Amino acid sequence: MAFIPLLSPVFRMVMRGVSLVVWLLTIVSAYGGKFNPEYLTLPAVLCLALPYLAIISIILTVFWAVSCRFFFTALGVLTIVACMGPLSQAMPLSSSKKAEPRQQTFKIMSWNVLHTEDTRKPDYKGNRAIEYMIASGADVVCLAELNNFSPSELKNAPQSLIDSLFRTYPYKAGLSSSDIKILSKYPVERAGIPLSDSNGSHKRFDLFKVCLPGHTLNVAMVHLYSYDLSEEERQVVTEIKSVNSAKSSVKEFKGSILSKLRNAFRMRAQNATELRETINGITGPLIVCGDFNDVPASWAYNIIRGDDLRDAYAETNFGPTFTYNLHAFYFHIDQMLYRGPIEALSLKVGKINSSDHYPLLGEFAFSK
């Protein structure tokens, strides 16, 4: 009979144990961003997996509902309800909007371009990243991991394509000492903040002012501290194909990988605090975007967002997404936050895979 496994006491006991563990991990992951990674690393790591744990939790809840086990069904429902706040950021239930008549709109792209290297098509005759920027329709393009606009950084791009890029975006800004750059159809300049603090530590963001028609837009482009994993360490997840390989991966994770993760979470917490202190002094419309190297509801995300920034993805999309696309690390680590007299209409994740990150393309409207 089809329902015999469901009636088996041993099977039910195993499923109860699995369900309780998954629901507990889901709650910890949902609120992992409330724990300072300076003291606790595991909640920060689990926070990365929130959408996946939430989906498994929902599946288990449905399983118990179909099995008519109402106590465990109720526990599953309570778990999802308890996590609704963080889940609304990681798995929103929203949709894109349209601008009202005569509202002024603009489009802004945020992308870690990996020095425009093509990870999937290294022999491509041209430069897919540049081609994508030109065709995007964005008014402002914010780039991370780009040292300059020289041919050595604009890999394999013929001069005609580079000329087309600069015809489309005649204005550019960014220091040679930083890997953060900006291209614009309208005049743009750095806001003049020092890129090193009093201790000589290099800041992981830069601030720009874009002179859109009738408005000045503040843009904080971000590239927070990376996980700093080697290529071999990044392969730990993708190489899990059996029980033995899983055990080996767990051993590696407990070693150098966990240590590097711990350091990365702590460094991003410092980066986020510095950024938050800087944007506290900014007035007018502001967009904070870029490679956060961390997910919605994480400690760094919460510090930067504070009580005043809004999440463009959470307000205009339905369900989870991911913006990193290599080594099976499918996490939503690129963000676009905003405040001031502007409203997010849409935020799309471009599916061009030249870089290890997907680009974000947001459309906004001035509300005043």
Image (cartoon, rainbow, N blue to C red):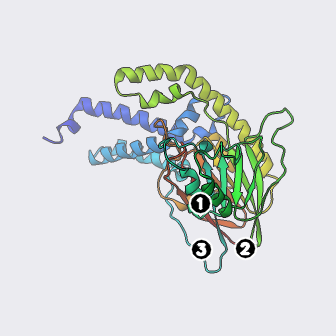
Q: Amino acid at mark 1?
A: Ile
Earlier sequence position, callout 3 versus callout 1: 3
Q: Where does the C terminus fall, quadrant-wise?
A: bottom right
Please identify the residue farthest to the bottom as the structure is shown. 101
Residue 216, quarter of the rendered image: bottom right
Label 3 secondary element: loop
Label 2 secondary element: loop
The residue pinned by badge 2 equals 368
Residue 255, quarter of the rendered image: top right
Q: Nearer the viewer, residue 292 or 206?
A: 206
Q: Which mark is residue 99?
A: 3
**Residue 114's x, y, as percent?**
60, 42
Q: Which mark is residue 102?
A: none
**Residue 54's x, y, as percent?**
45, 44
Q: Nearer the viewer, residue 9 or 62?
A: 62
Residue 294, quarter of the rendered image: top right
Q: Seen in the image, is 340 located left or right of residue 329?
A: right
Q: Amino acid at mark 2?
A: Lys
- Looking at the rendered image, the disc whose residue lies closer to the viewer, 3 or 1, is 1
Q: Where does the N terminus fall, quadrant-wise?
A: top left
Q: CA distance from mark 3 to mark 1?
A: 23 Å
The residue pinned by badge 1 equals 134
